[in-house]
Amino acid sequence: MELFIAIFTGTIIAATPLIFAALGELVVEKSGVLNLGIEGMMLMGAALAFWAVTAGYSMPVAILAGALAGAAASLLFGVLALTFLTNQYAAGLALAIFGSGVSAFLGRGFGSEPIEALHGVRIPVLSDLPVLGPLIFRFDPLVYLALLMFVAISWFLYRTKAGLILRTIGESPQTSHAIGYPVIRIRYMAVLFGGLMAGLAGAYLSVAYTPLWVENMTAGKGWIALALVVFATWQPLRVLLGAWLFGGMTILQLQGQALGLQVPSELLSALPYLATIVVLVLISRNRQMLALHFPASLAKPFRPAS
Amino acid sequence: MRIAAPVLACVLTLIVGSLFFASLGHDPLPTLYAFFIEPLSSMNGLSEWLLKASPLILIACGLAIGFRANVWNIGAEGQFTMGAIAASGVGLFWPNPESALLLPLMFLAGMAAGMAWAAIPAFLRSRMNTNEILVTLMMTYIATLFLSYLVHGPWRDPAGFNYPQTALLPAAAMFQSFDPAYRLNSSIFITVVAVLLMWLFTDRSFLGYKMSVSGAAPLAARYAGFRESAAVWIGLLAGGAAAGIAGMAEAAGPLGQLSPQISPGYGFAAIIVAFIGRLNAFGIVLGGLLMSLLFLGGEGVQMTLALPSALTRIFQGILLFFLLAADFFIFYRIRLVRPVKDAPALETAR
């Protein structure tokens, strides 16, 4: 039972940064924009949030700082991709490199001391339930926020008019422009939202998941989040399931290392990356399934025809 | 104008760099001097400059062939690593460590390993429709972990005081330095040949033309009967071969042995080099020289001014940002339009 609880809660926690980052990217991609710079935005968020904690700010302020750092970074991408109509692949890569550089630069003074991690919640009665308590009601607040964001984004995308407009823009910006929707402005908002979420994901890593600063601590999670969006065939529920799947993989790998499995630790560490490839292959083989929810204008620069 | 954009981007990067240094409390001019001029003011500096530019140019040439066809190999870092591993494996374990064949064999091993590592995403993209960006990147993480496994485990030098590194490569497995005092070695000729080959391929061959059409106008390419999968394979294999060779040259040159950290990010920086060079062979040479200077400058100010070497990555990012933005002014004409006020309401057709 102990082990089961450890694996279950570990999975949920490991999935949380992926949920934030991938859901944010989902919204961005649904608007027809491909931001490859998640890794950079996450690192900026992680660095800023960690800095805020060491500078003595409260946890909520630190997390907000991380989210805003991600949004600020995404604005750089937005200006390039939306205003300057650059190749979105290149702009995203530039952001990934830039973010890793800036975060490493900021992080040089952080030292290697861990900080006090974000606490789990304490709900009277519920948190003290025998099995369910530790299983469901003792996570830190961001875990619940991630789930809340899932509900909110699913509702927004498929149950509101604004969400419909966003998806329309992702399918055909020319049509949306002709109808009179502000394509560029809405795409900017989507990109900023994606940055905010990536920043949150980074903040979660540095103040809750592993509460210490290590250069390039995201270790590819931003790229895995990108893969998750493809894996999810651009559907929120599948993003959530995919994130849990990857979270579970991470935890099993860590448990395996802890149990001293007779395999090299590097092989276990490589599992999430291998799994990403395998999963991508399985999903991408089915072109129809991909095409069904794929935003038709993804990564194509939009210039209003005049 | 095609040349103006990179120049403009460099100037803007310098300006932002100066402001950045100033904000850190360093006098911008001496700092820029330390970053960009000082490294080139000695023979050793010049040698290091070319030494670092060589892998960047080599990899960028290979990558650009793919980028021209919209094949996004961003895992050159992993292909570089695999090339270095395979070449070092041959160098360390070949039965006759004094064989004159050693270096050529290592060259082939490095190239083959880089190509093999790139063949996986090529196969997955052409057969399974799998996004090559994500696969090449994931393969980079796997290659890094594989290297870490080798140097911590089976390939660790038993006489190496438990450091995670392999034994030194035998002398016959190393490129000759031009001058024992400096590290620049004859592997730079490989890069020169690669640049020429790249130019021939892109500018003088039908296949290269087909690749460019695939990138610029995929529908036209399909209509003309150019196979997309051929572009994918050639694009990825070219990048993999170049990166693998670069990894081999790094192992058989400045490194001389494997350790967990063998690349300061050449594989990623080469992507930027390819873009600065406009995916063009001779542009890439200039881009590589510039990028190499950024690496050198980053190391320089780290030592002299105690500024972190992460500055290099920041400069790389800023440079690419400006370059992409500058393109806008080349490809588009700016027209100021006033928003129409009180436009007559459109009558909807019924």
Image: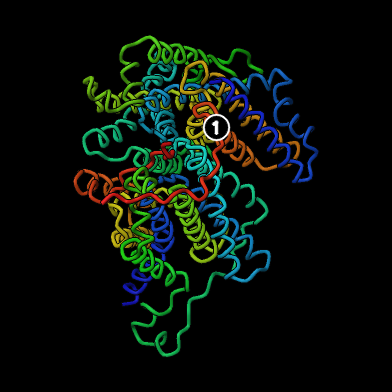
- The quarter in which the C terminus of chain A is drawn is top left
Residue B292 x/y as whole percent: 59, 26
Judged from the image, the secondary structure of the residue bearing numbered disc 1 is loop
Residue bearing mark 1: B334
Q: Is residue A243 above or below residue B216?
A: below
Could you tell whether A238 is left or right of B168 in the image? Answer: left
Subunit of label 1: B
Q: Which of these two is toward me, B15 or B57?
A: B15
Figure coloring: rainbow
Could you tell whether B180 is left or right of A185 in the image? Answer: right
Q: Which of these two is toward me, A3 or A94?
A: A94
Q: Is residue B26 visible?
A: yes
Q: Residue at x 68, y 32 (%)?
A: B14
The three-letter code of the residue at mark 1 reads Ile
Q: Residue at x 36, y 25 (%)?
A: B216
Residue B120 x/y as whole percent: 29, 34
Residue A159 x/y as whole percent: 32, 66
Residue B109 x/y as whole percent: 36, 23
Q: Is residue B260 visible?
A: no
